[in-house]
Amino acid sequence: MLRLFILLTVIISQLHLLRNVTPLYALVYASSVCLTFLIASLTATRMEYGSRRILGMILGLYGIPILAILPGLVSGAPYTSGSLALGTVRLIFTIPIYVVVLWLPGTQSNLRALTVTAALFSVLAALTIPYQFVAGPISWFAESSERAGLFRFASLFGSLTTLGAVCGMGMILCVYSIRPASLASIAVICIAVGSMLSLSKGAIVNVALALLVLPLVRRPTKRHLVVLLGLLTIGFLGAFAQWAGKLSVFWRAFRLTDQSATRIYDDVSLAQSILDRLTALPRLAIAFHGKFTLLLGLGPIGGAGNLGYPEVPTPHNGLVELLLMGGVPLSLWYLWLNERAFRAGIARASTPEVRGEAVVGLYILGSMFLNMMFGSGILFSPAGALFFAIGLKLVSPGLSTVRRAEPSLD
């Protein structure tokens, strides 16, 4: 019963774009969360040690930017009561995702149900991209854009860039949780194709990294490879037949270098984009708020458009975003959380029986950290929160091993 309500809460949270269709969505989500907490309390489910410790760290990750609202008000941040409420609500929207995932008893059947749910949502979100190329943009999705003369469509996961940031994690979960191998191959191809069609430059890196790690998660069989190569061939031939005249334009959207050092179609190369996200764009966001805001942060307004402030410059760098939201305390807290989680995952990977779970968890944590360096909003987005929570859940049992290995103060 508890697992059913937890999965229901996870599913409803990933359908957050329904808020653009009906205001009843917020009521449905809140009701699902309340029922989940009620069932958990009535069944007296006890959270495992590792999950309990990590949940405390997660609550700190949200509490610090909420506390940072006070110095933000004192420093003259452009808050109004309405904008303050909007940013805070968007910030705390994803807290239940972490709570229910970490609350889930860590049995093999529970973990597989959770990872299968996330994997299938990744496939569904990826398929909404080619669907829009055929049927046109979905009105209640995020607004479409353009890159290199081609349309860019948002996915079910939310903004234009969200799918590209989490696609690698979705591919890993597909291979880890979906049986048989042929279905896992189809799921991986669907995510890869949808992610590339989203024209997100981050999708190139994330798809490539996932493909390199897949054999570590699940040893490929001959049938697996045949299905994978067959689908790749069919997909390539189909794309060539459909877009033969546009392939050169499509490549411009992902060009790795900018030989002319100028913008083409109001865009820059992948290399220049990486450099901008590490330097120029964070500088613009910091200059907008002032350098002293990096000490204690400004609260939700530091999240810019991701938390409902489209007029505020986005740093396009998640680590800088943490500084703007919660200052040095939030950044150090996030690094501390990752340090504990990575140590737990490495400790768990030393046990052969659960090595696969640990590898998946470590990949998700590493992918989250890497993507945060080149994009904003992933940590507090519903899709990013779900994958991060799953990664933390998979490594959390290792905290018990780490605790036993640490020297006693006695």
Image: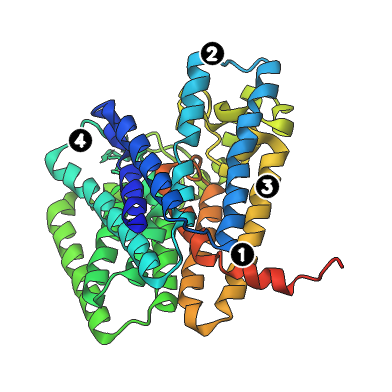
Which residue in the protein does label 1 denote?
342
Position of 386 with respect to 373 (left or right) is left
Label 2, label 3: how far apart the Cα atoms are:
28 Å
Q: Determine contact: label 4, label 1, CB under 8 Å.
A: no
Which residue in the protein does label 3 denote?
333
| In the image, residue 398 above or below residue 194 | below
Label 4, label 1: how far apart the Cα atoms are:
39 Å
| In the image, residue 382 above or below residue 49 | above
Q: Determine contact: label 4, label 2, CB under 8 Å.
A: no
Q: Quadrant of residue 213?
A: bottom left
Which residue in the protein does label 2 denote?
80
Of pointers 3 and 1, the one earlier in the residue sequence? 3
Residue type, label 4: Ile
Point out the frontmost of discs 4 and 1. Answer: 1
Mark 3 neighbour class, 10 Å CA radius: few under 14, some 14 to 19, many 20 or more:
some
Q: Determine contact: label 3, label 1, CB under 8 Å.
A: no
Could you say whether the residue bearing mark 3 is in a helix, strand or loop?
A: helix
Of pointers 4 and 3, the one earlier in the residue sequence? 4
Q: How is the image coloured?
A: rainbow
Of pointers 2 and 3, the one earlier in the residue sequence? 2
| Residue under the image location 17 percent in, 59 percent down | 240
Which residue in the protein does label 4 denote?
138
